[in-house]
Image: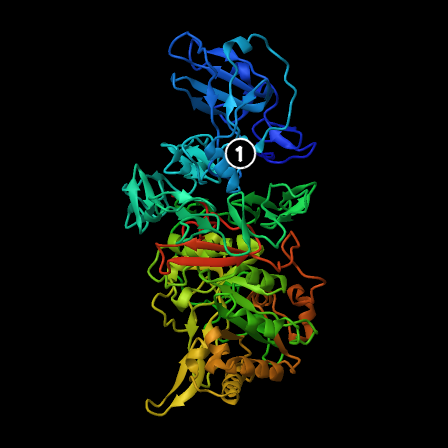
Amino acid sequence: MTAGIELGHVCSPGDVCASKGTCIDGTCWCAPGHTLGEHGYCQPSHDLPSPHPTSKPVSTSSAQINVTMTTTNTQQPTQPIVIDNSLPTTVRQSPATFAATTSHHERVPVNLMPATNVHHKQPSASSESAQQHGKPAFPAVVLPSASERTTQRPVAPVQPNSNQLPVELGQRCAPNDICGQNAVCSEGICNCQHGFVAYEGRCLQESTQVAKSAGTVRRPDEPCSPNDECDGGSFCDGNICTCPPNSQLVGGRCLQDALRQGIAGPGDSCANGELCSGGSICDNDSKKCICAAGHTNDNGICRSESAPKSVLPGQGCSRGETCAGGSTCKQGVCKCAPDHFESDGYCRPVAGPSSNLNGTGLRFSSKSGEPRPKAMPCPLPEDQSACRLPDCFCSRNGRAIPGGLSPDQTPQFVVLTFDDAVNGKTVPDYKALFEEQRLKNPNGCPVKGTFFVSHEWTNYDDVQWLFHQGHELASNSITHVPLNGKSASEWFGEMDGQRRIISKFANANENEIIGMRAPQLSTGGDEQLEMMTRAGFVYDNSISANPGHNGQPFWPQTMDYRLSWDCQTSECPTKSFPGIWEIPLNQFYGYYLPQIQAYKRSSMIRAATTLNATVEELVSLLRNNFDRAYNANRAPYVLSLNADFLQLNGEAVGMKALEQFIADVSAKQDVWFVTLKELVDWLRQPVPHTQMDRIDSLKCRQGKKLHPSGRVPCSKPNRCMYRTPDLNSPEHQFLTCNPCPQMFPWVRNPVGKLYL
């Protein structure tokens, strides 16, 4: 059964609206004579409980605001009641019933449906100021006096003004703003009221099953276990729900120190230390939140003046707007593909694990299962039935070829992997390598690489270009700091959080980001692999293996059984994690150091060489380590590249050496350049190099396999700027083809919402 389109969202004739709503003039809304009730669905207005025995219905016209007034006495006010709905903020909102309180303590529930006979007073100063700053302001509404309310008039349904909808959960609000159901405006942000928890944009009672799907709900300072949900912006640390660093417990919620002075949008004053939002930053001279040069304030969000306006899923695109977040413009509305759903401003895949995001951060979508057994040694070759492809592979010494192939039958795979932020420092090298598609595989298809993307200092318009070119994107964490010793939940927040950042701001397919590399190659043992299993990651490329200077390198294996090589990292896995592929980083042997009578070796190429190495010396290093595999067991040759290597000596010595090496070995018909995802596809179904055309993922792409939107990279991205006093750098910025988020995406808030 479909849930239907949420109230307040655009609809087409025949669409099913949620909450028992109706599609009226292109928008899901409660039908005339109906009101959104306290249980969250539309019901006849006369069925709603009266708030007070002396309540009296009041009918109006013009914009059909049905008002019920409850007073502390039976005397009707002789003067019109004025409700000033000027909004000092702008957000995408959804419908609900709101109440205004008058000076007589009357509670005035207002049905947000069109009506007639409503007087509008002139905009207030605050309203004019809001309009000047690019933010919508509601005209103040004067309710008719008693003499004007003597007769009932029929009301014609008119499309409601979307500006009159309540503020979304987690978004900025002012004291007179209306938050959604079971939410209140607290500390300038719409948050769930006491006894309710945030779940996918809604406030659910703590007692509901869906609210507790990831564990028991705990409040700040209460005891917790790793699977519990800590409410109020806290997280489980040392078995106690604890507020994150640089935040304090205020009124039962964790309030970030940076938000103590409030939040201001583009054009607003930040003179009192307010934190600017929407991609703006506080100007030291004017003390106002300003957008980057060449950008304008578009409803509280900074966007490039020279680029087409981009809008999020569910918003209108009938005027040439560009649909963002993986959505496509259909019938004037940005919609997700049928196998995707809209969440947090982008299209997410229906299949696979779906992490939940609330003010605390990311949480697993399900509880952990039974305790995992200890990993045992590989049972092969004695027990062939214990581990079979495509789901399991191992060997006693780690050097056996999958599928029982001989070395001369086995393709020699070379994998180009890149580990760095993607920005103006690194992208020129990537474009020099790949843009003209000069490098080819034996079937004539262009060579692709795997990019382990970390968040800080990454520009997502460049990441989108990589995805558009057909390269693989993988997660390298948000902060790029070591995570050894951290819990599975903390690994999840970093690795799945970065996957979501890439998907949202680079318009990449979330379900295609299946691999990860631990930041700084600092592995997390069982906690890391537990996270990978529950989060749907397929492979890891973090653990180093030392095959020796002239030894055969190691093949990948699944983690059903114990690693077949000596694990030399700080935290090694000890339990069984069926189906997770570990692709080892066979160490590179570089220069011989006579003073210690040993070779310089490392999992990263740059650390195996010297600063003053020449192109010829680097080509020799790359070729010698390649031959160690090619002339032996053909184990995959994974090149771990970064900007330090490519730009060695400041003269791109590493880049020149890499290009020469690729040209040399690509002449061999049994050498294939693949991504790590393509390597896993082959490992599951190994075939001889003469039958590589059977592997679909290695075939030439007929057109680009893009995000469901088919969007190409933009030429005029939005520059999103933020003050980040709680981070190492006081300011951050990034580029994206999508609208700027309200806040800088980070751990516990990867999509950049206005969370406390």
Q: Is residue 435 left or right of residue 752?
A: right
The residue carrying pointer 1 sits among few (fewer than 14), some (14 to 19) or many (20 or more) residues within 10 Å by Cα, namely many
Q: Relative to 379, is 158 above or below?
A: above
Position of 719 relative to 670 (above/below): above
**Does residue 524 sit above or below 168 in this rendering?**
below
> Residue reaching furthest right?
702
Q: Is residue 91 left or right of residue 329?
A: left
Q: Position of residue 63 (x, y in %)?
A: 59, 22
Direction from residue 187 to residue 80 in the image, left or right: right
Q: Position of residue 354 (x, y in %)?
A: 50, 47
Q: Residue at x 33, y 43 (%)?
A: 254
| Point 46% across, 19% down: residue | 108
Give the secondary structure at mark 1: loop
Q: Position of residue 498 (x, y in %)?
A: 47, 56
How many numbered tags mark residues here?
1
Residue drawn at (55%, 82%) of the image: 656
Amino acid identity at mark 1: Ser
Residue 717, can we see it?
yes
| Image side of residue 263 versus residue 299, left or right | left
Label 1 sits on residue? 94
Q: Quadrant of the N terminus?
A: top right
The quarter of the picture where residue 45 lies is top right
